[in-house]
Amino acid sequence: MADLETDYLVIGAGAVGLAFADTLLEEDPDCHITIVDKHARPGGHWNDAYPFVALHQPSATYGVASMEMCPDRVDTHGHNKGMYPLAKHAEILAYYHKLMMDHMIPSGRVSYYPLTSYESGNEGEHRVKGILSGEEQTIKVRRKLVDGTFFQTSVPTTHTPGFEIAPGTRFATPADLPALWQHAENLPDHYIIIGAGKTAMDTGVWLLEAGVAPDKIGWVRPRDSWMFNRKLLQPAHAGLEGLIDFQVALVECANGSENGDEMLAKLGERGVMLRLDEDVTPKMFHFAVISEGEVEMLRGIKQVFRQGRVTSIEPGKMHFGEETVSLPENTLFIDCTASAVPFEARANTRPFFDGDTITLQLAQTPFVPYSAALAAFVEANFDTDEEKNNLLPPAPLTDSTDTYPYAVMANLMSTGILSNNEKTNEFNARCRLHPTGPAIAKMMEENDPRLAQFASVGKKIRDNMPGVIALGMKAKAIHEGAA
Ligand SMILES: Cc1cc2nc3c(=O)[nH]c(=O)nc-3n(C[C@H](O)[C@H](O)[C@H](O)COP(=O)(O)OP(=O)(O)OC[C@H]3O[C@@H](n4cnc5c(N)ncnc54)[C@H](O)[C@@H]3O)c2cc1C
């Protein structure tokens, strides 16, 4: 006999596991959910993040469906001025703590086991182990095991850098930077940011805002990246015009483009996508969102190394295979090479619903919490796996400029499927994690004149769809070939 029993056993109390559990509690008022996580607090990888991390998208569509994360106002200062707030590290952790302590556990329908590892399971009985106690317990799962660990999020403090670090080298992760004030007698003479993604951009902005002169910062960027312009991705109730421009630009730029690079270059010309260097064609696209103010600031860093990946570092030296770059002896190297979401795992998509297991993935790229909440809605409101999987084909996690059109095509197809189904259409209209659903539903209720603008989007999408599909299919072949 098992030590514990539950209806759904959710592995992972990160953004994904919690968004799923939150919607399931709402949609299935009878079920009991057990959530286990290795971390000591809810919030998943955010527990390990650097203290100056913030969401890169407005908080309006992040978190869980039942609880707002975003104050309804724009920032009045800083590089996000005029735009809706981005929840900061402490706010994200406080949000998930409050969700668990004030809502989930008091509901009486959630059991939460922090510092607990899911070990393995067979035939409805599963094993978990207290990480500090070593105590093992078996759990009988009456309905389903829910895997909320698919994304395998990797952050600098928990990953192992892929380069050698000689003894005596000044080396840090972004999380170490706020403590530099404790070394005021021995500050670095130079800073090298290693990595080209959003963590590296956050680190560059942090150093510059902290007062480090741009010529004291070097940046290793093996691949440059396109980024979404945050100005256009504001919450729909306040920024529907931007979202419309964004959606129309996507389909118009895809239609007629030979490849993803051409599509993204056109989006760049329209100001929908931003890049750090106008003279370099980015090859990476990881769905990062950035403000024009941050881009302007980061362009101040002129010492950019594009020799590829760093292979080793030592005091005053950085190696790229055979090539060596000399630097001031007291250089601080900052590791920003953790991949956040390991895109190499893109080959591993599987059906969301498979017998007694649910694997939480993307239904729409890159809407992570929305996809998990939608999966819970579908689980509670439809019967067979076939029906459920037809509604939720896993969306591709593309990582490069030549594969991005596949994600655009898949999102539009998913939108078609979900809006053609009465129940999922109704869910999208009320789920706060959906980028436009509730705002449009409210406008319809109030007969808002802005709806006229929205009506023209459908026609533009339909007119451009043949070109979107042609380009998307080419990108799909590249994505699947690389996977
Ligand atoms: C710096 C950074 C910024 C980001 N910003 C945004 C953003 O602005 N917007 C956005 O949409 N996305 C953003 N993302 C993407 C982000 O990864 C997702 O939004 C989301 O947080 C991923 O959540 P998750 O639950 O899948 O993963 P995690 O947060 O990693 O949670 C998974 C949990 O599963 C637990 N776990 C794993 N294996 C086991 C096991 N065997 N037993 C028990 N527990 C286990 C882990 O301990 C972990 O707590 C960002 C990512 C990073 C790294």
Image: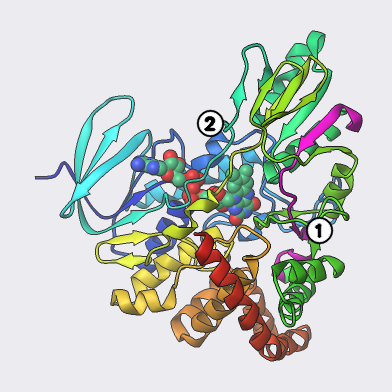
Tell which of 421 and 28 is nearer to you: 421
Q: Residue furthest front?
A: 322
Q: Residue furthest top?
A: 185
**Mark 2 to mark 1: distance in Å?**
30 Å
| Magenta stretch bounds | 214-236
- Amino acid beneath label 2: Thr
Is 265 on the left-hand or right-hand side of 139?
right
Q: Residue at x 77, y 20 (%)?
A: 331
Q: Earlier in the sequence, mark 2 or mark 1?
A: 2
Residue under pointer 1 = 274
SS class, disc 1? strand
Q: Is residue 248 magenta?
A: no
Instruction: Where is residue 428? Give x, y as percent.
Output: 54, 75
How far across and down, in percent of the image, does residue 183 sit?
A: 75, 12
**Residue at figure coordinates x 63%, y 39% from the top left:** 89
Query: Which residue: 51% across, 45% down?
Result: 153
Give the residue type that dot 1 points to.
Answer: Leu
